[in-house]
Image: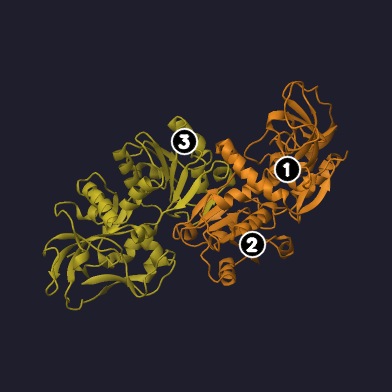
Chain colours: A orange, B yellow
Amino acid sequence: MLRAQYATRGPRPADVIEAVEFTPAPLVEGQALLQVLAAPINPSDVLTLTGEYGMLPPLPAIGGNEGVGKVVELGPNTTGPAVGTTVLLPVGVGTWATHVVADAKKLVPLPGNADPVQLSMLTVNPPTAFLMLRDFVTLAPGDWVIQNGANSAVGGYLNQLAKLKGYRTVSVVRRESAIASVEAADVVIVDGPDLHKRVAAATGKAKIRLGIDCVAGAATDRLASCLAEGGTLVNYGRMSGEVCHVSPGSFVFKDLTLRGFWLVLWFRKATPQEQTAVFGEIAQLVATGKLSARVQATFDVREIKAAVALAASGERAGKVVIVPKV
Amino acid sequence: MLRAQYATRGPRPADVIEAVEFTPAPLVEGQALLQVLAAPINPSDVLTLTGEYGMLPPLPAIGGNEGVGKVVELGPNTTGPAVGTTVLLPVGVGTWATHVVADAKKLVPLPGNADPVQLSMLTVNPPTAFLMLRDFVTLAPGDWVIQNGANSAVGGYLNQLAKLKGYRTVSVVRRESAIASVEAADVVIVDGPDLHKRVAAATGKAKIRLGIDCVAGAATDRLASCLAEGGTLVNYGRMSGEVCHVSPGSFVFKDLTLRGFWLVLWFRKATPQEQTAVFGEIAQLVATGKLSARVQATFDVREIKAAVALAASGERAGKVVIVPKV
């Protein structure tokens, strides 16, 4: 059995993580041994390796926050999904591994006939898109939403969810070459000067009340300049590596609200019923193929260094997913 | 009769404005002629002269947005406050003048025995402080509020209002020499690195849920770093001349909300009843001396260039007020 482990953090994720052999201790009551089928590398995983994330596990740690697996063995006197069942792995167990041991009570059964790679990305990016679209501004069918970094996985999920709800979307990307990677958008525009004028022209001067920013830096203010008076800008990332810039011209004179979104805080505050409702809806959409993310490449656990290096690079056109070889 | 007029806008306010003689047309029904007793120069007036404000009057224009006057004459068949009454001048009439003509219906009588210089500052800064303290976070006696640029007139009003409500205040200033100009604060601290640590030490690690920023730039983020999870940061100015910087570390991971406040939008949205309630409370406090602003210097209308130059400089210890000589 193999897992991707790191004992230090640093600016080059590939330098700090490596695949190591391990043998799990015999299962005790309440535990399950799972074979990992797929586990993605998210931007938050990269920031965890560099030490820039808002919550860092004690070291040494196993990489990977989400994924799907198959039940291989249940501990003594343990009830849980039957051996062979495909399940969602609990958040934070260290999923970049061939096998993980987890609390059997926390395993959520998934349809066995759906694509495990798509299912493996269910816990982090789709609810981020879902909640940002639902919890900040009350939208009606026909309303517009604008986002930057729209070729990201969250960006694709957000556009797909918006389309399912009947909203219209403007997708802003940072380079011409990213246009082809944007999914399901009504309007795609390359970021730059006069963004608000080009957006106004492309949408017929629509009053856009919700903006979603994962780039930060001056891009935050350009997105803010596209919003209508009283609108809300939600930031959830900093792909530019910079802090958000917001000019008073945008948010004082136009009464904009700037919010941050972090799924971790939602998990802390949402009741189990709320969480089940959200994940039930998302799991259904993913399992039926209505919600999906592009995959750039899959890697074995052995190839973890190449996998995190690709995930950390800006020139991807899809997600990097660990698919352990058996 | 004299008034301060400008026909162009530019980076040096003193270069574009000048005192000119004028003779008002004979009053028509509904109008009143007022002798101006006092009219302050606010930061928003300076930004109006430089062209950086969110709302700009057509040119040529008379400077000055607020002030108090005395009724000199009423138009034919006009009812209004009797000749000799001290009144609040309507917003935006161009108050840096020896006399103004105004709509008699819009004149609000004021106590004749209160200081006209203090009354003249009633319309802009006190409601800004009052509403920022009231409308964004529900505070209880004992709660803390933090603000920067706290030696400003709004800063002083905010501290005085907070004290009246039983809130505790942290006042952040940009230079040692400004400490002496801060009014009514519980804690005064000079801005700089580790601000959040020094604030935590000075307040016994108080959970501060409301921050008020008029400096912008990196100062916005330093103020944000002092707020508790779920807190709100309200920006209403940019004394640094920079855009606001906010790091995801502050507002994504801590779930902060960043809002802008602009009194002009409140005037547009608040009902007459709401406006009367707010100004009734403030006028009472100013007239009885419970709410006041420091005055750095007073100038005649003739000295308008020197007055706006001083108002635009960073090294003031109080407000600049036009007090026309008669």
**Quadrant the C terminus of chain A occupies:** top right
Q: Chain of mark 1?
A: A
Q: How far apart in space, not on screen, are marks 2 and 3 (Cα)?
A: 39 Å
Residue type pointed to by label 3: Val
Residue B98 figure quarter: bottom left
Q: How far apart in space, not on screen, are marks 3 and 1 (Cα)?
A: 31 Å
Q: Is residue A277 left or right of residue B60?
A: right
Proximity of marks 3 and 1: CB atoms separated by less than 8 Å: no
Look at mark 1 in the image and give the residue it sits on.
A11
Residue B64 figure quarter: bottom left
| Residue density around tag 3, few if under 14, some if 14–19, many if 20 or more, within 10 Å | many
Per the image, label 2 sits on a secondary structure element best described as strand
User: Which disc, if any, is residue A172?
Assistant: 2
Q: Is residue B311 visible?
A: no
Q: Residue at 49% x, 38% y: name it.
A: B228
Q: Chain of mark 3?
A: B
Q: Name the foreground residue: B214 vs A18.
A: A18
**Quadrant the N terminus of chain A occupies:** top right
Q: Is residue B159 left or right of residue A122?
A: left
Residue A319 sits above or below residue B300 on the image: above
